[in-house]
Amino acid sequence: MSRIYQAPTNATQDFQHTDNEIQQLHWQRAVALQRQNETESAFASVPPEILASIAEFICLAPTAFQSLPVVTSNRIKPQLPPLALASISSYWREVMFATPSLWTELVIPEAKAKTIEANPKAATLLDMYLTHANPLPIKLDTPWDTHITEENSGRLRALVLRKPLASHDSLNLFTSAFDRLTTLTLDLRGTESNAIDLSTLPALQWVELSFVRQLPALPWRQIKGLTLTHSFESVAFDMLVRCEQLVKYSHTFPHFEGGEDWIQEEFVTLHHLESFECAFQDDVSQWHWSRSLPLVRLPAVKHITFWGLPHNDNARGHLSEFFSHLSPTLTSLHLHDWSNPSDIRQILSKATGLTRLRVNILDPAKMVDVLRVLSSAASPEASNAAEMLSPLLEDLEVVFHRLSHGFSLQKNDFTEQITSIAQRRCALRNLALYFCRGTESASVYVNEQAFARKGLTFQVFKGVMW
């Protein structure tokens, strides 16, 4: 019986507890709304030109947000930065829509739909950006070329197609109607039997192509930047030669097409080229590509990057001859997986104008040998210019990989070489050591305080760094 009499009392207590919780939620909601109103009021007093500058920093900075969280219908979903900022308040929306520069870069997310007809939201999004960016041209990054129409082609300044061209008809997509397009990125897989014609694009200057198998038609004399990936080496070299005004060239993983043994036979001088980068995937492509490098002259080059140690003696010989003709204009050099001390010694003897040098050492057995080359070149006892580091060198980075697997590092030898580099005969200001891939314990061999001196920044990094 007692339980029966207690039931109404318990129910009353439960109702009272629930009512208290509801009142507490109402109070919290009122406080949140008050804070929101205060925040909106504060932002409403910000002059539109300052608000627009803040928005530009968020939307267009090099580290711009790909998306921002927006609360809609009691849930959070990512939203493109300009749209997210425009949803804050009516005042923000007015300022965002009145600032064309915020709408000049659009990345259309990849959806399951492969056509614009099956993905109408993408078309609506593009139209919105084109409307609010007017009269400025925009950069469009999209999975499919079906977003491009004759009506909007003249509004594009840069175009990135992340997926292969939808069909062979797309090879004829690019006409003179793209009269403001300066930058173009294409994936040419699936179009190997047809060469794409881009020669009618009047403003094209920067081109990035993947899987090039046939020589494309380009407005060669106006091309300033050429980036190739997984492309035939003979076609790549032909393109390199044709771009008379080229400023930047990069080729990642050149492919040897087999069959006829192609080789460049005439000297090539690229008078305007400032940046030259090449990454090799295997010994075969490295050897074939390197055979042509001794015939290349780069009188204006400022930056060179090579990824991939030349394991083949013939390839090493070709690259050695290429480096023997280095221009004194070279100021930045990055050698990845170059662990042969004699190669590095020869390169340093020619690179007399270096201000920045980065060496990645993947072979732990060669680490101290490479450091010994650097330290001897930096030593005050270096007797002639051919033995010295560039007197202009300001930044030196050395990256160590894979020191585990039973490798024993001699602490005294390592410290001696680093100390010698720190007591250099050059303008060195920044010395950075990176210990990667299981090499964290190697940092005990470096006493940062021992190298602390006025004018020299010494840094030790641990983790993965390529």
Image (cartoon, rainbow, N blue to C red):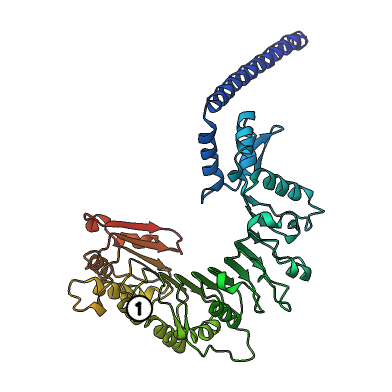
Q: State the residue at coordinates (43%, 70%).
A: 405
Q: Is residue 452 left or right of residue 466?
A: left
* Above or below, comparing residue 179 to residue 296 in the picture: above
Q: State the residue at coordinates (25%, 69%).
A: 391
Question: Which quarter of the figure has residue 236?
Answer: bottom right
Question: Which quarter of the figure has residue 170?
Answer: bottom right
Q: Is residue 335 visible?
A: yes
Judging depth in this view, the residue of 15 and 103 nearest the camera is 103
Q: How many marks do you count on the picture? A: 1
x and y, in percent, of residue 238 in the image: 58, 81
Q: State the residue at coordinates (69%, 44%).
A: 131
Amino acid type of the residue tagged 1 in the rendering: Ile
Judging depth in this view, the residue of 152 and 392 nearest the camera is 152
Question: Which quarter of the figure has residue 297?
Answer: bottom left
Judging depth in this view, the residue of 50 and 84 nearest the camera is 50
Q: State the residue at coordinates (34%, 58%).
A: 460
x and y, in percent, of residue 282 in the image: 54, 80
Q: Is residue 99 left or right of residue 278?
A: right
Extreme right residue here? 117
Please rate how many residues cluster around mark 1, counting C-alpha atoms within 10 Å: few if below 14, some from 14 to 19, many from 20. Answer: many
Give SS at disc 1: helix
x and y, in percent, of residue 155 in the image: 67, 54
* Above or below, comparing residue 338 to residue 43 in the picture: below
Position of the N terminus, as image quadrant, is top right
Where does label 1 land, which residue? 347
Q: Is residue 311 visible?
A: no
